[in-house]
Image: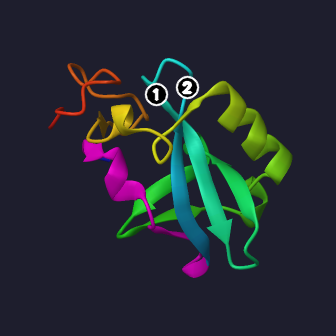
Amino acid sequence: MRGLQAEELLRRPVLVRGIRLGRIADVLFDASGVRVVGFDVRCGDDVHRFLPFPAAALVGGGLELESSLTLLGEETLEFYRRRGRSLVAGDELRGVVVDGNGAVAAGAAAGNGTARC
């Protein structure tokens, strides 16, 4: 994945073999705001689930999963929400660029919303 603004990931579909399971509702970073750890996915049943960053591949306009079993329950989502930082909850991560490994691009430290690729 090329460098991508974290905001560009919001509302993208989450798919398994082309079948839409839900949409990305939030991008979750580690506590320091330098790496994406996963996503809050609002699924078709209106339940929010956690998707670990390494379990997804950006394909076309969405995130493709190998299995729906990689979507973890609300308890896991809350664990990462409490210990990390949310793109949607604060302005300090707006505009940051993440690379294919989920790292915030060099020079785009959290709190510096002016970063571009």
In the rendering, at what x and y percent does residue 93 appear? 36, 35
Q: Are marks 2 and 1 in contact (CB under 8 Å)?
A: yes
Q: Please, is residue 109 above or below residue 58 in the view?
A: above
Left or right: 97 in relation to 25: left
Circle 1 is placed at which residue position?
Answer: 35
Three-letter residue code for mark 1: Arg
What amino acid type is highlighted by mark number 2?
A: Asp
Which residue occupies 60% across, 61% down?
65
**Location of residue 84 (image quadrant):** top right
Against 3, residue 65 (above or below) is below
Q: Residue at x 20, y 19 (%)?
A: 107
Q: Which residue is mark 2?
A: 30
Task: Point out residue 36 in the picture as x, y percentages from the top left corner.
Answer: 49, 35
Mark 1 packing: few (<14 Cα in 10 Å), some, or many (20+)? many
- 48 or 37: which is nearer to us? 48
Query: Does the stretch in magenta take in 35?
Result: no
Would you say residue 4 is visible in this rendering?
A: yes
Q: Specify start and end residues of the magenta stretch as a single range.
A: 2-20
Q: Residue 108 appears at what percent x and percent y?
A: 25, 25
Q: Residues within 10 Å of mark 2 (few under 14, many from 20)?
A: some
Q: Residue at x 35, y 31 (%)?
A: 92
Question: Of label 2 and label 1, which has the lower sequence position?
Answer: 2
Q: For this view, does 93 lie left or right of residue 77?
A: left
In which image quadrant can residue 33 be found? top left
Figure quadrant of the C terminus: top left
Q: Is residue 73 visible?
A: no
- Residue 110 occupies which quadrant of the picture? top left
Compared to residue 60, the image places residue 33 above or below, namely: above
Work out how far the residue at label 2 is from the one at label 1, CA to CA, in angstroms: 6 Å
